[in-house]
Amino acid sequence: MSTRSVRPSEEDADSPELTAVQAALAAEHAAVYGYGLLGGRIDGKRGAEARAAYDGHRARRDALARSVRDLGGRPVASDAAYALPFAVADSPSAVRLAAVLEDRIAGAYADLVRATEGPRRAEAAGALREAAVRAARWRGGNVAFPGLAERAAGADPAATGPVEAAGADGAR
């Protein structure tokens, strides 16, 4: 899954901070969609973890939408559906998707940390940390540089790339 590009037009160029907040919001939209999909394929203790992550991403999404408005922007809308990076047919593939979602969210928050200062930076750093911890739990291990796919040893850049928006039928 990858988020669509959040690029302002030439005449409507946004600040780097607003652009990064919009990108994080788009990533949260994709994560909410992904967790909604994988939640039904995981049960037991892992199902409770998926529900908690889903609720956490919804709360972050709503907070980011408020931040966009506070910065004078119009929050990027969620797409109707997102293309998955692989088929999610069972619990193991759902767990794998959860780890991918968290890796991608970590990347968006790493960018937001770089683009902001003060309380918003602290909030972004907290969100990055939470995503890295959730990714490690889903994966069963951690990566050297959460949120920095290009620095993770042996990381496949395509595996942590953006979430692609898709039509309801999954076609691009």
Image: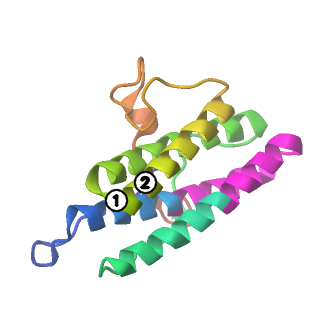
> Marks 1 and 2: in contact by CB < 8 Å?
yes
Question: Label 1 sits on what residue type?
Answer: Gly
Q: Mark 1 points at which residue?
A: 118
In which image quadrant can residue 26 be found?
A: bottom left
Q: Going 42% across and 17% down the picture, which residue do you hit?
A: 154
Quarter of the image containing the C terminus? bottom left
**SS at mark 1 in the image:** helix
Left or right, 150 with respect to 166, comes to: left
| Residue furthest right in the image | 44
Pinpoint residue 79: horizontal percent, then vertical percent. 48, 69
Q: Going 41% across and 56% down the picture, which residue do you hit?
A: 3
Q: Name the residue under label 2.
A: 122
Left or right, 72 with respect to 152, comes to: left
Question: Label 2 sits on what residue type?
Answer: Ala
| Residue furthest top in the image | 154
In which image quadrant can residue 68 be found?
A: bottom left
**SS at mark 2 in the image:** helix
- Front residue of 130 and 75: 130
Q: Does residue 67 lie above or below 5 as drawn? A: below
For the residues marked 2 and 1, what is the alpha-carbon distance in whole angstroms? 6 Å
Rate crowding at label 2 as few (under 14), some (14 to 19) or many (20 or more) other CA atoms within 10 Å: few
Pinpoint residue 126: horizontal percent, then vertical percent. 51, 49
Residue range highlighted in magenta: 29-55
